[in-house]
Amino acid sequence: MKKEKVDRRVQYTKMILRQSLIELLEKNPISKITIKSICEKADINRTTFYAHYTDQYDLLAQIKQELFDDVSVYLTNFTFHENESESVQLLNKIFEYIKQNSKICSVLLNDTTDTAFHEQVMVIVQKLCMEQLTKKSFNQNIINYIISFAATGSMGLIRKWLDTGMKEPTYTMAEIILKLTNQGLTAFV
């Protein structure tokens, strides 16, 4: 059975619509963005937009889902290794992905965007941490606090890195998250 190829024009149209929405989201919340403004920015007509998406919220949802799926692949393959270099390598790949997709990541991780994306990422990170922490002899009453701290702290660190222009190399950021998560502030003192 042959896999159906997606028409290049369709791929291009979807790409330009996504880029247009992301650029508009850098300045406005989704509630202030219209189909007309997306189409004008993308230089396409509304009929073409509606051939692919029901509205601006559907377009945003599909962008989020794609990013979420990509990040999920990285995170589900992540395990805390005794050998820290393997963990740093995997986290480095995540940071490289974030850097390559910095515009959309900045938009989705800022305070004005729908918090559902934050919650989805937090659920994945919490699940990952829960699996790892339950293998160790942690007090079950404390595990949720540890997970919340690690996940929220990691998201905050990523936001700060994006907001400050991603000056530090991705590998350095991966090392910082891993050290903070595994050793706390004492790793840097």
Image (cartoon, grey):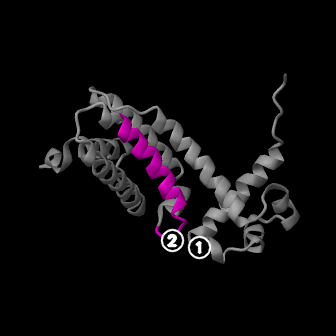
Q: Amino acid at mark 2?
A: Thr
Q: Residue at x 60, y 68 (%)?
A: 25
Q: Calculate the distance from the C-alpha at mark 1 to the C-alpha at mark 2.
A: 6 Å
Secondary element type, mark 2: loop
Q: Nearer the viewer, residue 130 or 16?
A: 130
Question: Left or right: where does residue 158 sit relative to residue 67?
Answer: left
**Residue 175 location, x and y as percent?**
29, 41
Query: Mainly helix, strand or loop, the magenta region?
Result: helix
Question: Left or right: where does residue 154 sit relative to residue 67?
Answer: left
Q: Residue at x 33, y 47 (%)?
A: 173
**Rendered-image quadrant of the N terminus:** top right
Would residue 95 be seen by someone viewing this image from the given angle?
Answer: no
Please give the count of numbered marks on the rendered protein.
2
Secondary element type, mark 1: loop
Q: Please say whether residue 110 is one of the residues in the magenta stretch.
A: no
On screen, 146 above or below 113?
above
The disc label shown at residue 29, or none: 1
Q: Residues within 10 Å of mark 2 (few under 14, many from 20)?
A: few
Q: Please say whether residue 120 is one of the residues in the magenta stretch.
A: yes
Q: Nearer the viewer, residue 134 or 179?
A: 134
On screen, 130 above or below 53?
above
Q: Amino acid at mark 1?
A: Pro
Q: Are marks 1 and 2 in contact (CB under 8 Å)?
A: yes
Question: Left or right: where does residue 70 sit relative to residue 127?
Answer: right
Q: Residue at x 65, y 57 (%)?
A: 61
The disc label shown at residue 112, or none: 2
The magenta segment: 111-131
